Amino acid sequence: MNPAHGWPYWLRLLLAALLGVAAACGLAPLGYWPATLLALVLLVPLYLASETSRRAALLGWVFATGYFAHALSWIVEPFLVDADRHAWMAPFALIFLSGGLGLFWALAFGAARRIGGSVTGQGMLLAMTLSLAEFGRGYLLTGFPWAGIAQIWVDTPFAQLLSVVGPYGLGALTLLATLPLGAALFSGRALRGLVIPLGIAAGCAVLALVYAATRPPVEYTGQIVRLIQPNAPQHQKWDPEYAPLFFARQLEFTVAEPRPDLIVWPETSVPAWLGSAQPYLSAIVDAAQGTPVFLGIQRAEGQQIYNSMIYLNAEGQQEGLYDKHHLAPFGEYVPFGEMMARFGIYGMAATTGNGFSAGPGAALIDTGALGKALPLICYEAVFTQDVLAAPDRPDFLLQITNDAWFGTRSGPYQHLAQAQMRAVEQGLPMLRSANTGVSAMIDPLGRITEALPLGQAGFIDADLPRPHSPTVYSRIGDKPLFFVLLALFLLLWRRARTRRV
């Protein structure tokens, strides 16, 4: 029943790589989610044809490397900003990042094949091991959950399930609806094996549609937030010739009428360190005319430097300070930085060997009438755990970012999609101010209500949505799902061993 059994091993590997590339088409900006589902189904016969666990692991690694290479192709963009220093690292970054992330999936494929079991059971087991591998990818070391399977569902009714099971749960449901289906279609008991995957798919579809239709309507506060987007290209952002022009542009957007209730500038939007930025801050306060302002700025404290966000209240006084705590490795810091600096390797956004220091952790900033904000700087919005770590429930999520690092192709759009996911998971609005875009107001259902396109300077004035009640996922987080998946994996493992005996 499985035609892949007769194919040469090299052909199976080639097809796995091509299927990985196709699977990434489901991510933003393409959003071709059927391509992801079809690629996962067609991958299964190639996996089942693997004669050993080692061959299965290599097949999984090849598939994953193709997937991540396509999904993360934007990763070469940061290395081209300062090409003289970093361009040589660009191909290595894409290869090592894609291949490194692929090791998680390789382990999942190898473990599932080693355990074995019936043909239909193999699809279930592979779905479990891949789901657990995704947890590892998101949490181990510094974590990097970018391009998770659940991201294909942004802007579809299925995205509302994020508020119940979170991104890892939605990813697991996707795998459970596709991988066992692929196993069933290429087994001798197709009809029997189709019951579980089709049941999961139908159940998810019904639940998603019903849940999306019954979610409470979004209400608005009537308070207007201005999101500033200066559109400063990264290679000019700190250039002494251009930096004053970008700062003046932001002042122009800030002073524009009518007056909003809150103004948000993007990440590192002030061309000076906080300790010497008083002239800049005074200009911002004058332009704001009594409107509170959030802005991104760098600051130093002794020998340590921080990527920070400050809040200037209506009187122009600094009332809040947040230091980014989830730093980008090899971007904002380099492990063993001083030693690596001897070989000319620095973090791209850093100016010293060790780079930026991490702040103490998630914190809230009280804005008074608008409520409490949970600050997120750049790719902190990629991590569900950074949002779940808030000391109390905020009234809105606030992301400032500089996506000029990510180029103009897929990176900024994928970053935006993940911000939408955090809003759905928490039932909270997300305010997003991006240097080059996409700046957006996102409601608690993950819908973009106002946005400024990528690569355009300007601002948007958007009505701030009210938060929804705490979601199921915001209450329970990821731990219950992890233990459920682990229990199912152990159950399938035991069942496979019993069958062998």
Image: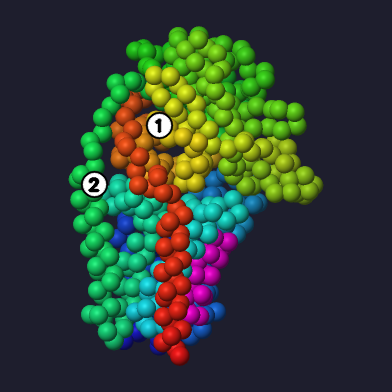
Residue 187 horizontal side relative to residue 52, left or right:
left
Task: Decide: is 205 above or below 285.
Answer: below
Q: Residue at x 49, y 70 (%)?
A: 108
Q: Say if the magenta span includes residue 499.
A: no
Q: In the image, what residue occupies the spot 30% across and 40% down?
A: 445
**Residue type beneath disc 1:** Phe
Which dot marks residue 212? Answer: 2
* Residue range of the region highlighted in magenta in the rendering: 98-116
**Amino acid type, label 2:** Ala
* Residue 60 seen in the figure: no
> What residue does disc 1 label?
396
User: Which circle marks residue 121 in the picture?
Assistant: none
At numbered mark 2, what does the secondary structure look like: helix, strand or loop? helix
Task: Count neighbours of disc 1 (C-alpha within 10 A) and say few if under 14, some if 14 to 19, many if 20 or more.
Answer: many
Say which of 85 and 280 sits in front.
280
Q: Nearer the viewer, residue 457 or 440?
A: 440
**How many circles with numbers are drawn on the protein?**
2
Label 2 Cα crowd, 10 Å radius (few <14 / some 14-19 / many 20+): some
Residue at image location 34% in from the left, 21% down from the top = 224
> Mark 2 or mark 1, which has the lower sequence index?
2
Which one is in front, 219 or 45? 219
Please tell me whether the stretch drawn in magenta is mainly helix, strand or loop: helix
User: x and y percent of residue 232 in the render?
Assistant: 51, 29
